[in-house]
Image: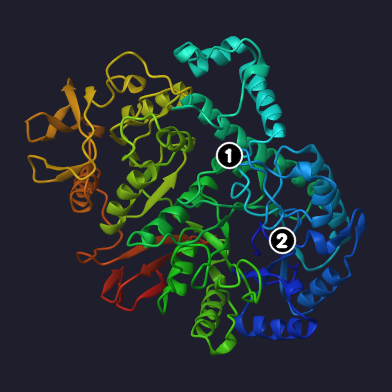
Amino acid sequence: MPLPFIHWPSDAAPRIGFGADYNPEQWSREVWAEDIQLMKEAGVNLVSVGIFSWGLIEVRDGEFDFSWLHEVLDLLHAHGIAVDLATATASPPQWLIEKHPEILPVDKRGLTADNSSRQHWRPTSPVFRKYALRLVEAMATEFAEHPALALWHVNNELGCHNTYDYSPDALAHFRQWLNTKYGSLEKLNFAWGTHFWSQKYSSWEQIQLPQNPMTFGNPTQTIDFKRFCSDVLRDYLDTEMAVLKRITPDIPVTTNFMVMWTYDGADYASWADHVDVVSNDHYLHPGPQSWIEQSFSASHTRGIAGGKNWILMEHSTSQVSWQPVNYAKLPGQLERDSGTHFAHGADAICFFQWRQSSAGAEKFHSALVPHTGKQSQIWPEVVGLGEKLSSLSHLAGATVEQAKIAIIFDQDSYWALANDSVPSQAVKYHEHALGWYRAFVERGHSVDVITSQTPLESYEVVVTPSLYMVNDELAQRLTSYAEQGGLLVGTFLTGIADENDHIAPSVYPARLGNLFGAQTTDWMPLAPEETIILESGLTAHTWSENIVVSTGKVIDTYPNGKPALVETENTLYVSTILDTASLRQLVDRIALKKSIAPALTLAEGHRAELRVKVTADGSRYGVLINHDEGPVSVGNHHISEPGFHVVEL
């Protein structure tokens, strides 16, 4: 059956989506005809259209021209290519800026954005919403019955450039949001701890945005501001979606998240129930960990989606255009990158963009059709990927088999530990979680990256790297999980603060009591370049603690003989950060304790991972991502070639 979250034509066979952002408005009609032929050659079946086209659709205030867009959609439909149609609200047109400059966002320095880029609008601006929703209404009405329409694409990359706005509109809405959340200044003053530094508020009008503190800002205020900014963007998503659902109730709606470690703008876990299908954009962060970060982000996206399949809306065929050095991908990397997302549940593999721009800020960003066209080494890889995805149509809608091991990634803890007034700014929450993920994957295990709201009972091992903020409900779930036989692995700074970033005057982690059979009396962060060798020979860095053991068993100690790692029957507490090789040894111990066999047996240093997909009839298929040359065994299959491979299990 066709995938439920893409409205394919009723006569369409099951398929994996494959395509890109398509911006025909940048090109002549002669190029459009060539585009269609190249799309057919590459196997493209899904394109996103109209993302940055507001000024070409509403050419003047209230004056709409849909003729060119009809022509494009008609052409695509005639050749069997489905359309993810954007609402085109991502960048307001010049006539709107001229008429209403008050919709422009304000940055942390108090400077108003100009109109020379994109996403130059305030999420809290009632004026912007009025004009944007009028456009959405017009778009939905105009294309409601168009046969090419397979999916609605709200705005673009919400939570990217204009997340943190410091305008008067944002201030007014922040005060309203706080009033709704707390209900009284008394509760707000308690939550923010305003007796410290004489910050107590006696009226809502006294509250300002955390824009330019003289020294360290109020940490709870800062976290609340980030929560507010995320909620405002989600509310904006809801307003567009409401219009689309009223006019086209049968067409699925999505928007592209930014689940990658270079962005911290939105709590996407709280957005997942507000779209029909989760979509994500992902771009590689240069460096030796780029492959594992990509896998982590793909698994995290599936976790945000509640274990459901999702859409990879954007990634790159090769270089991007916005990094200090825009590295080209190596031959074969395009397929491996795409396969990583497919392995973790992406049932549509799409790129930015179809044809590489000849002008504008992203003209050096790679595309499916580069400037050099079919002469580029990218083009044969694009065609090969299209053929491969087409051959995997039998896996359309197949679900990713749940792993036995999960890592909790919590947005509030991420925000809190990014504050400037923390015990050590050398502790990077995302990198700490990524280190655990990498260790398990490099030992051949499958790992789910889940949110702090995800049910835990079906996992055999749950790891909580520096899960700093733990409310009462989460504390109870973690405790119940361990008491019922699951293995809970906690690290330093887990269970320290409540949802208001308040720390109990007690031994750490007071939020979880004596769950780990040991408690910490003192934190002793290490110097940035300092390493220590534990009694077992494991190498640690960044952090150390003074631990008092009660019911737990010490399994490793610091050089001074004091406890470093403590376990009970159903918990393990790790009070430091282990280097990569040491952490691999520890995850072996964890897996052995729960009798979890690795999905792959890997040679030292070999980079590969496996996820299993299950079809509706119960058939199981292994999706192997082999990053290096060298033999890997999956069941009875032996594979030595790099790339992504699918085998029946």
The quarter of the picture where the N terminus appears is bottom right
Mark earlier in primary sequence (1, 2): 2
Cβ–Cβ below 8 Å for labels 1 and 2?
Answer: no
For the residue carrying disc 2, how many other residues have a C-alpha within 10 Å: few (<14), some (14-19), or many (20+)?
many
Task: Give the number of the mark in front: 1 or 2.
Answer: 1
Q: Position of residue 26 (x, y in %)?
A: 73, 74
Q: Is residue 530 left or right of residue 289?
A: left
Q: Is residue 246 left or right of residue 368?
A: right
Q: Is residue 140 left or right of residue 359?
A: right
Measuring 42% from the left and 41% from the top, which residue is drawn there?
409
Q: Is residue 129 above or below residue 607?
A: above
Q: Report the Cα–Cα distance between label 1 and label 2.
A: 29 Å
Q: Position of residue 109 (x, y in %)?
A: 58, 39
Q: How is the image coloured?
A: rainbow
For the residue carrying disc 1, how many other residues have a C-alpha within 10 Å: few (<14), some (14-19), or many (20+)?
few
Which type of secondary structure does the marked residue at label 2 adopt?
A: loop
Q: Is residue 483 left or right of residue 192?
A: left
Three-letter residue code for mark 1 = Arg
Question: In the rendered image, which residue does mark 2 sit on?
Answer: 51
Q: Report the number of numbered marks.
A: 2
Q: Is residue 323 visible?
A: yes
Q: Position of residue 561 (x, y in %)?
A: 6, 30
- Residue 299's disc is none
Question: In the rendered image, which residue does mark 1 sit on?
Answer: 109
Q: Is residue 429 above or below residue 36?
A: above
